């Protein structure tokens, strides 16, 4: 059981006074564990809501590090985090611990994959979605449903956001709602993002999470909510039950029971249409050479290359410096600006991942990794210029 703040009645007094929560609900919150998948804008907001509400333990997972372009919306980070290129999971955990020194916050600097999703979801009461791509969301929702754990979906792009709490045995799973692959479309790197819409989505996700965790399960909203906060258009659709034919949420559901519209705003669309418009993407590519897997990060001009082995950061940094790279290092990662005329940056993580920034070309990213991380060869380096 998580350590309990001895002054919890004082700290949470205003929440306890809210009748549906009370002391009993607060105690339930303090005995809860949540997984926050992704520590970007949504993840930062969700983590802060959960921590300040008194959730006993937070498990944070994020594969990325803090950059200046994150600061306008990712509220747990500051300029120092960006200057030091700290991993988001660690930087977020450090901030959260300053908000509550008794909080239990577990930080994982990692990709979420089919091999580890079950490990991160093990023992949690709820999975909160702060990810930025459909592939990871689907993977996590599958895993959550297999474990009987609710998945609180959230997504935001430009001025639009959407959210739904998906409950095993109660609602359809994400795969049934958005399709097996999701659709490529706008994302915050191509269409931009208004920070206010993130707060709107995260607040709604947090509200459902607090209802569920405090024992107010009957109060959970059974709808898919989407909005455009700029034009102000709001749309709510009742969530269908699990579909009989689905291996994840199947059972009691009726596949003919499509989402039922409850209210329609001016910019309305159906549930699937809105999901597609928000746009999630994640492109998996075939394996090549000494590289185990690579994927272009949605709209970011970045490719993630996963080597088949861990990376010795100190040794690689030394080698990269010898090759004329400029290095930024901390205990979690090494960031190398490649020597001119190359324009790319390589960010190495000890778990064997390399983020290649400055290209969305997977073949080139892999070539750069082979040249600079997997043992450089003069010829190959030359051919990259
Ligand atoms: Zn399903």
Image: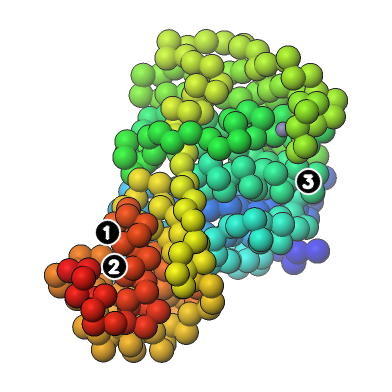
Residue 345 - label: 2
The structure residue drawn at horizontal position 15% and vertical position 72%, both measured from the top left corner, is: 340
Please give left or right for residue 2 compared with residue 188 in the image: right
Image spot of residue 177 (x, y percent): 63, 28
Q: Quadrant of the N terminus?
A: bottom right
Label 2 Cα crowd, 10 Å radius (few <14 / some 14-19 / many 20+) = many
The structure residue drawn at horizontal position 47% and vertical position 39%, both measured from the top left corner, is: 280
Please indicate, yes or no, whether residue 185 appears anywhere in the rendered image.
Answer: yes
Residue 358 - label: 1
Please indicate, yes or no, whether residue 213 appears anywhere in the rendered image.
Answer: no
Q: Which residue is at the front of the view, 105 or 115? A: 115
Between discs 2 and 1, the one toward the N terminus: 2
Q: Dividing the image into four quarters, tell me where ligand 1 lies.
A: top right
Image spot of residue 321 (x, y percent): 27, 85
Label 1 Cα crowd, 10 Å radius (few <14 / some 14-19 / many 20+) = some
The structure residue drawn at horizontal position 78% and vertical position 28%, both measured from the top left corner, is: 245
Please give left or right for residue 301 compared with residue 309 in the image: left
Give the structural element (helix, strand or loop) at label 3: helix
Q: Which residue is at the front of the view, 107 or 279? A: 279
271 up-or-down from 176: above or below = above
Give the CA separation, mark 2 to mark 1. 7 Å
- Kindly check if marks 2 and 1 are in contact, taking CB atoms under 8 A apart as contact: yes
Q: Quadrant of the C terminus?
A: bottom left
Give the CA separation, mark 3 to mark 2. 39 Å
Q: Which residue is at the front of the view, 231 or 21? A: 231
Residue 146 - label: 3
């Amino acid at each position: 059981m998580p350590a309990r703040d001895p002054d919890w009645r004082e700290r949470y007094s205003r929440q306890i006074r809210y009748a549906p929560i009370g002391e009993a609900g607060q105690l339930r919150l303090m005995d809860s564990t949540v997984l926050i998948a992704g520590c970007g804008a949504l993840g930062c907001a969700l983590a802060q809501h959960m921590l300040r509400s008194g959730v006993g333990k937070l498990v944070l997972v994020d594969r990325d590090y803090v950059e200046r372009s994150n600061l306008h919306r990712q509220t747990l980070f500051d300029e120092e985090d960006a200057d030091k290129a700290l991993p988001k999971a660690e930087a977020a955990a450090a901030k959260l611990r300053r908000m509550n020194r008794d909080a239990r916050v577990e930080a994982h600097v990692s990709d979420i994959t089919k091999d580890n999703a079950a490990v991160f979801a093990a023992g949690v009461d709820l999975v909160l979605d702060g990810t930025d791509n459909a592939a990871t969301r689907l993977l996590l929702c599958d895993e959550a449903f297999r474990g009987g754990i609710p998945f609180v979906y959230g997504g935001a792009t430009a001025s639009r956001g959407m959210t739904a709490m998906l409950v095993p045995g109660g609602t359809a799973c994400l795969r049934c709602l958005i399709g097996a692959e999701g659709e490529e479309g706008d994302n915050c790197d191509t269409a931009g993002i208004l920070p206010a819409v993130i707060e709107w989505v995260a607040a709604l996700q947090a509200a459902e999470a607090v209802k569920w965790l405090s024992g107010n399960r009957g109060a959970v909203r059974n709808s898919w909510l989407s909005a455009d906060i700029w034009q102000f258009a709001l749309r709510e659709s009742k969530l269908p039950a699990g579909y009989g034919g689905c291996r994840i949420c199947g059972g009691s559901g009726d596949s003919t029971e499509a989402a039922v519209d409850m209210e329609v705003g001016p910019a309305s669309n159906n549930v699937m249409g809105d999901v597609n418009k928000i746009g999630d993407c994640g492109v998996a590519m075939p394996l090549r050479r000494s590289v185990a897997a690579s994927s272009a990060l949605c709209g970011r001009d970045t490719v993630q290359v996963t080597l088949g082995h861990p990376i010795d950061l100190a040794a690689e940094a030394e080698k990269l410096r010898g090759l004329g790279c400029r290095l930024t290092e901390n205990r979690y990662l090494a960031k190398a600006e490649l020597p001119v005329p190359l324009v790319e940056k390589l960010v190495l993580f000890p778990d064997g991942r390399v983020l290649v920034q400055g290209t969305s070309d997977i073949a080139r990213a892999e070539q750069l990794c082979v040249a600079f991380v997997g043992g450089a060869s003069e010829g190959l380096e030359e051919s990259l210029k």
